[in-house]
């Protein structure tokens, strides 16, 4: 018996990283999956984004667990595309119980140096995209008699961080969105919470652009994962540089499960103590 037997989960940004990890962890506990990802590059993102073969690999891994998955290329900035993908998934799998609004991007720059394109693209994915995901899901969750919605914020959704002010603003916004949704949807037994990670060992931070931000004093050939790990370690109270994607997935699983059936409106850090530093 799995903790999510008979449930259906909708996960955005599911081609790799945290999104794939969430899909796998929920499927391991019995859930069937509706997955979307842009699987394309965006102009202002300074690292390589997921490709169609990444989403295909997510499908392969879910099916290897003997779970069903409906995977679609869709951009969370496009509400109609999100709605169509989710509606199709629900039509095939029968219902919707869980939402993981995980899709997000990352870029860098001092506030005075950010371009409108960098600001707009990040806000459109990391905040508007979360709203689009929730908006598309609400009718299905309501028809189901309730459910759980987990919005991915960040430790940067709670505290200030230099050189990523647009990201900080969006992730603070996700918490405000979550709290409003939690109040509006409580009468329908729809719970809404955020999960707030510290740095996670995925492609979003393990790339040359992030390494340059954290180690501008080092020549490129010296910016290795081990060297950068020591600098990332200074962000957390626990003596680790980053957490693994599955650590966030376990929090998503808990918030999605009946163990959290009366938890709503909560900011749930998985931050290695970053927020107490």
Image: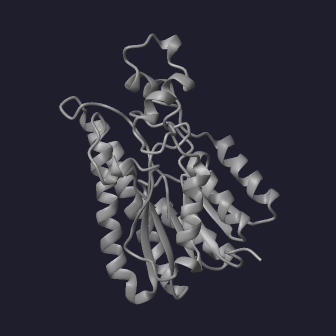
Residue 26 placement, left or right of 81: right
Percent position of residue 171, x then y: 34, 53
Task: Count the marks.
Answer: 0
Question: Taking the image as drawn, is residue 85 in sight?
Answer: no
Examine the rendered structure and indicate whether residue 107 appears above or below residue 251.
above
Percent position of residue 107, x then y: 38, 35
Residue 173 placement, left or right of 57: left
Percent position of residue 89, x then y: 63, 69
Residue 177 placement, left or right of 201: left
Q: Nearer the viewer, residue 255 or 65?
A: 255
In the rendered image, which quarter contains the N terminus?
Answer: bottom right
Going 71% across and 77% down the picture, which residue do you hit?
Answer: 5
Examine the rendered structure and indicate whether residue 82 appears above or below residue 54.
below
Residue 32 placement, left or right of 273: right
Going 70% across and 79% down the picture, which residue do you hit?
Answer: 6
Percent position of residue 211, x then y: 45, 25
Q: Nearer the viewer, residue 118 or 203?
A: 203
Residue farthest left in this picture:
112
Question: Taking the image as drawn, is residue 74 in sight?
Answer: yes
Going 40% across and 26% down the picture, which residue do you hit?
Answer: 214
Report which quarter residue 4 is drawn in. bottom right
How did the renderer colour the structure? one colour
Going 49% across and 26% down the picture, which residue do you hit?
Answer: 228
Report which quarter residue 29 is drawn in. bottom right
């Amino acid at each position: 018996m799995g903790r999510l037997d008979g449930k259906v989960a909708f996960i955005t940004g599911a081609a790799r990283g945290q999104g794939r990890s969430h899909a796998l962890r929920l499927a391991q506990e019995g859930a069937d999956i509706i997955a979307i990802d842009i699987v394309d590059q965006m102009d202002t993102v300074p690292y390589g984004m997921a490709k169609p073969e990444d989403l295909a690999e997510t499908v392969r891994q879910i099916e290897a667990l003997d779970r069903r998955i409906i995977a679609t290329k869709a951009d969370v900035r496009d509400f109609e595309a999100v709605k169509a993908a989710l509606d199709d998934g629900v039509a095939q799998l029968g219902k919707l119980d869980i939402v993981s609004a995980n899709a997000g991007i990352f870029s860098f720059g001092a506030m005075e140096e950010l371009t409108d394109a960098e600001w707009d693209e990040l806000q459109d994915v990391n905040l508007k995209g979360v709203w689009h995901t929730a908006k598309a899901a609400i009718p299905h969750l309501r028809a189901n008699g309730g459910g759980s919605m987990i919005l991915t914020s960040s430790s940067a959704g709670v505290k200030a961080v230099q050189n990523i002010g647009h990201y900080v603003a969006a992730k603070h916004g996700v918490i405000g969105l979550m709290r409003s949704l939690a109040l509006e949807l409580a009468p329908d037994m729809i719970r809404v919470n955020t999960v707030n990670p510290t740095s996670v060992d995925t492609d979003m931070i393990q790339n040359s652009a992030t390494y340059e931000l954290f180690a501008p004093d080092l020549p490129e050939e010296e910016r290795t994962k081990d060297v950068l790990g020591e600098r990332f370690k200074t962000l957390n109270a626990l003596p680790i540089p980053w957490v693994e994607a599955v650590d966030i997935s376990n929090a998503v699983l808990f918030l999605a499960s009946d163990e959290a059936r009366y938890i709503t409106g909560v900011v749930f850090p998985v931050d290695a103590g970053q927020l107490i530093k």
